Image (spheres, rainbow, N blue to C red):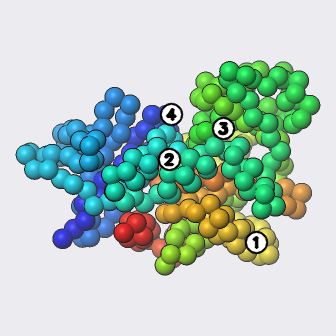
Amino acid sequence: MKKKIAVVTGGFSGEAEISLKSAETVLSHIDREKYEPYKTIILKNKWLVEYQGREYPIDKNDFSVTIDGTKISFDGVFVILHGTPGEDGKLQGYFDMIGLPYTSCGATTSALTFNKAITNRLLSTYDINVAKSVVSYRENPTTANIILEKIGTPCFVKPNNGGSSIGISKVNTSDQLAGALEKAFHEDSEIIIEQFLEGTEITCGVISQNNEPKALAITEIVCESEFFDFEAKYNDHATQEITPARIDDTRYQECLKLSEFIYETLQCKGMIRIDYMISNDKLFVIEVNTIPGLTAASLLPQHAEHSGISTKELFTNAIEAMF
């Protein structure tokens, strides 16, 4: 009998648009000979299943749905909900409580990695290079003078909890700082200001294979805009994504091994992607993405393809790993 899989998408943040596109990729490539997928949308005001053009409400008591008088209980959840509540551990905690397996990292790992500052602090204890940073809180903001003194310019201003480069600004001069802080605070009550690292931007996809972390490939990002922002990621066809990255083999192997080490150390599950910068001949971790995009423009499917894994096989591997 086919396993019933809820493909969970949507969310409460600006990343919902990308989440919905990622879900369409999953629904298009999932192995329907093995699984019966249900597009499941979680929004602030409603949780529902879209089925044959109609909407059916989710019963939050056990995450089931009743369609035409028949109650459907899911065997597992394919989590492709970027941002909150899918990438920050909230949904995972709920699924843990009701005993429903899912494809993504657990609640603790998800919550930790969603907070960029805490992730950086933890990784630095393993002597992993991270950018120098300052955290500012909406209720007790760090002054511009302190930011400029500790970080200087150029720098990046980012929401501390978020993804898809939403709310991020590159600040080249001190007079740009106030506007960048306001933009980031519009997305999050905590923001992180990081030093600018000049160099080569790369990213590495990692999956679980036979219960072991497996780094797939490394992509080099060559961006025409100032940085790899939302437009560059999803709408700018001038951005080049070169797989494998044009870096020397020693650095390439170092990045693969470090990615697997981070996956294991943070107790990750499912598919993740880690972003890096090679600067001053050092490898810096920029961000750990526990629910990476799976749209037609996304990087992880490219990593899988380079490793000889089809998109269907990639998704099958993620689903089977949760049982």
SS of the residue at dot 1? helix
Residue 78 seen in the figure: no
- Say which mark, if any, is on residue 89: 2
Question: Can you say which quadrant of the picture contains the C terminus?
Answer: bottom left
Callout in the foreground (4, 2)? 2
Residue at (45%, 34%) from the top-left corner?
12
Which is more N-terminal, label 4 or label 1? 4
Describe residue 273's horizontal placement relative to residue 201 as left or right: left
**Residue identified by numbered label 4:** 14
Looking at this rendering, what residue extends furthest in the right direction? 149
Q: Nearer the viewer, mark 3 or mark 4?
A: 3
Q: Amino acid at mark 1?
A: Glu
Residue indicated by mark 1: 254
Q: CA distance from mark 4 to mark 2?
A: 17 Å
| Residue type, label 4 | Gly
Question: Mark 3 or 1 closer to N-term?
Answer: 3
Residue 220 in percent (x, y) is at: 69, 60
Is the residue marked by circle 1 packed among few (<14), some (14-19), or many (20+) residues within 10 Å?
few
Quadrant assignment, res 129: bottom right
Kind of residue indicated by mark 2 = Gly
Quarter in which the N terminus is drawn: bottom left
Tell me which numbered mark, 3 or 4, is placed earlier along the sequence. 4
Verify CB contact (< 8 Å) between mark 2 and mark 1.
Answer: no
Q: Residues within 10 Å of mark 2 (few under 14, many from 20)?
A: many
Residue under circle 3? 160
Q: CA distance from mark 1 to mark 4?
A: 34 Å
Per the model, the C-alpha gap separating discs 2 and 1 is 29 Å
Instruction: State how far apart marks 3 and 1 are (Cα).
Output: 27 Å
Please tell me whether mark 3 or mark 1 is closer to you in this view.
3
Upstream in the sequence, badge 4 or badge 2? 4
Q: Secondary structure at mark 2?
A: loop
- Distance (Cα) linking label 3 and label 2: 15 Å
